């Protein structure tokens, strides 16, 4: 009997009677990380890493029905040994290791192999079956070292200051925003949209050390923002608020900037290929390190990536899932949060 199966509700462990990142409500959901395409509202009970709980609480109001465990701690669920290991994707992101009667399966969720200085570094786990993402599973995706990207952003901001422009960085509220704050902290004040600031506060309350940033409110004047760095989620990229700032200059922080700069973000002044996912080389390195006998390839460039793995001698299978588009899911969460809070900036 296979330890996991792919069902219309999500990745299911029959022996343990739980789902991993289900896309429909279930009784028991094991959550790899807090992004909206993997962590959904409506499950009866949740299990996640300790630092993913603040995200679920902030976004969905979940508290009493969320059980947490730390990395490398093991619990037994109906005879299945379940252990979480760092995925390096965002704060609290985890790979789920399942062990039953000698069989080991690891479900990666989303991951990146370059240590970002704020999320716990990715740790490859040896297993028989590895379920991998393939968001950037094409050879055209090759990230620059992140420090080089941050230097480019700093130079762009410095140039904007000289031209009296307001530097606006578009980045996910969860993951990218915290990385930017961590690595750009310095001379210029950093202003964060409310959805980012709220998550930052949740992380700080949970013991995560983050450099200080200023929550954007209606009291903050445009000339103050012009002298600093403004970070907002993608949902606000084309907002009237941004257009009303002093000479706004928009920089998009996304792995898609490697190839999509001229498509979705036509109004952007700059693009920085900063991603919270592994690139082509990172995916291959991670998969080879697991020494898995079988690789299940989910969301992303599944067909091409699985075919390549088979060509180089790694048994791989494309698996269709309903995770959808991470960017779109995150934007919907932000839009709902703004509507619920009824706040204006």
Image: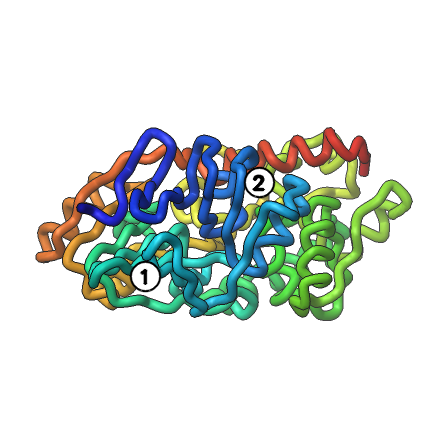
Image disc number at residue 282: 1
Q: Nearer the viewer, residue 229 or 248?
A: 229
Q: How far from the left and from the top, in percent, is residue 48?
A: 51, 54
In this rendering, would 30 be left or right of 97?
right
**Residue at 74% from the left image edge and 45% from the top image edge:** 194
Count of numbered tags: 2
Location of residue 246 by image quarter: top right
Marks 2/1 in contact by CB < 8 Å: the verdict is no
**Residue at 56% from the left image edge and 46% from the top image edge:** 252
Q: Nearer the viewer, residue 82 or 339?
A: 82
Q: Earlier in the sequence, mark 2 or mark 1?
A: 2
What residue occupies the far front of the structure in this picture?
78
Question: The C terminus lies in which quarter of the figure?
Answer: top right
Mark 2, residue position: 268
Q: Nearer the viewer, residue 263 or 47?
A: 47
Image disc number at residue 2: none
Under circle 2, the secondary element is loop
Please indicate, yes or no, whether residue 201 appears anywhere in the rendered image.
yes
Which is closer to the viewer, label 2 or label 1? 1
Disc 1 residue crowd, few under 14, some 14–19, many 20+, Cα 10 Å: many
Vertical arrangement, residue 268 with respect to residue 127, above or below: above
In this rendering, would 89 be left or right of 170?
left
**Residue at 33% from the left image edge and 56% from the top image edge:** 80
């Amino acid at each position: 009997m296979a330890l996991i199966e792919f069902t219309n509700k999500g990745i299911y462990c029959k022996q343990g009677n739980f789902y991993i990142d289900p896309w429909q409500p279930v009784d028991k959901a094991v959550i790899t990380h807090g992004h909206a395409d993997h962590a959904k509202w409506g499950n009866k009970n949740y299990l996640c890493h300790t630092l993913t709980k603040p995200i679920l609480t902030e976004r969905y109001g979940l508290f009493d029905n969320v059980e947490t465990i730390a990395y490398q701690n093991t619990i037994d669920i109906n005879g299945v040994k379940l252990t979480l290991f760092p995925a390096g994707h965002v704060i609290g992101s985890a790979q789920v290791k399942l062990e039953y009667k000698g069989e080991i399966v690891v479900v990666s969720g989303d991951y990146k192999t370059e240590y970002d200085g704020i999320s716990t570094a990715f740790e490859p786990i040896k297993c028989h079956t590895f379920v991998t993402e393939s968001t950037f599973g094409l050879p055209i995706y090759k990230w620059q070292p992140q420090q080089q990207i941050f230097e480019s952003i700093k130079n762009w901001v410095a140039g904007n200051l000289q031209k009296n422009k307001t530097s606006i960085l578009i980045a996910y509220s969860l993951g990218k925003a915290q990385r930017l704050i961590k690595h750009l902290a310095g001379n210029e004040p950093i202003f964060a949209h409310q959805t980012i600031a709220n998550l930052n506060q949740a992380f700080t309350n949970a013991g995560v050390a983050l450099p200080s940033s200023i929550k954007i409110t209606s009291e903050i004047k445009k000339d103050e923002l012009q002298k600093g760095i403004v970070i907002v989620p993608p949902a606000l990229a084309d907002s009237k608020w941004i257009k009303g700032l002093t000479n706004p200059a928009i920089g998009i922080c996304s792995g898609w900037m490697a190839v999509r700069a001229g498509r979705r973000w036509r109004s952007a002044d700059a693009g920085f290929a900063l991603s919270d996912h592994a690139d082509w080389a990172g995916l291959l390195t991670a998969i080879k390190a697991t020494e898995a006998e079988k690789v299940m390839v989910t969301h992303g460039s599944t067909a091409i990536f699985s075919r390549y793995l088979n060509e180089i001698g790694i048994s791989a299978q494309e698996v269709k899932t309903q995770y959808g588009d991470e960017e779109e899911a995150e934007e919907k969460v932000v839009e709902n949060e703004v509507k619920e809070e009824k706040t204006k900036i």
